[in-house]
């Protein structure tokens, strides 16, 4: 392998590493954005569960009052 071949190979490897670093940064940003969405959805789900349970309790109380 000549010196030119080695330098060319090193340059290609450096380009490949730079490209991989860019991809990692982009994926990290996307992951952070998706995690924010997951957290928002979890919060909304918890609120909906609370509302559902409250409505269910009210409904059960209404049925009890009607039965009496």
Image: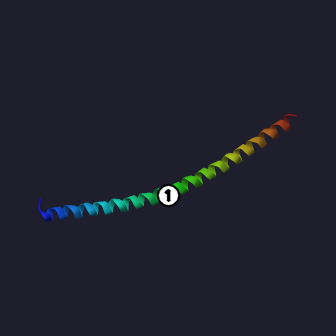
At a point 74% along the width and 45% down the height, the residue shown is 54
At a point 32% along the width and 63% down the height, the residue shown is 18
Residue 66's quadrant in the figure?
top right
Q: How is the image coloured?
A: rainbow
In the image, taking residue 63 as reference, residue 25 lies left or right, namely: left
In the image, taking residue 44 as reference, residue 64 lies left or right, namely: right
Quadrant into which the N terminus falls: bottom left
59 vs 7: above or below: above
Furthest residue toward right: 68
Image location (x, y in percent) of residue 21: 36, 61
Q: Nearer the viewer, residue 12 or 2?
A: 2
Mark 1 Cα-neighbour bin, 10 Å: few <14, some 14–19, many ≥20: few
Residue 62's quadrant in the figure?
top right
Image location (x, y in percent) of residue 55: 74, 45
At a point 57% along the width and 53% down the height, the residue shown is 39
Image location (x, y in percent) of residue 19: 32, 62
Q: Nearer the viewer, residue 16 or 50?
A: 16
Furthest residue toward top: 67
Furthest residue toward left: 2
Please give the count of numbered marks on the rendered protein: 1
Residue 64's quadrant in the figure?
top right
- Secondary structure at badge 1 equals helix
In the image, taking residue 67 as reference, residue 10 lies left or right, namely: left
Q: Disc 1 marks which residue?
A: 32
At a point 30% along the width and 60% down the height, the residue shown is 17
Quadrant into which the C terminus falls: top right
In the image, taking residue 15 as reference, residue 42 lies left or right, namely: right
Q: Nearer the viewer, residue 58 or 45?
A: 45
Q: Nearer the viewer, residue 28 or 11?
A: 11
Image location (x, y in percent) of residue 65: 85, 38
């Amino acid at each position: 392998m000549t010196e030119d071949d080695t330098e060319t190979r090193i340059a290609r490897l450096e380009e490949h590493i730079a490209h991989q670093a860019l991809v990692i940064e982009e994926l990290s940003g996307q992951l952070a954005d998706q995690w924010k969405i997951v957290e928002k959805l979890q919060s909304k789900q918890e609120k909906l569960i609370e509302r559902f349970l409250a409505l269910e309790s009210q409904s059960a109380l209404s049925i009890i009052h009607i039965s009496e």
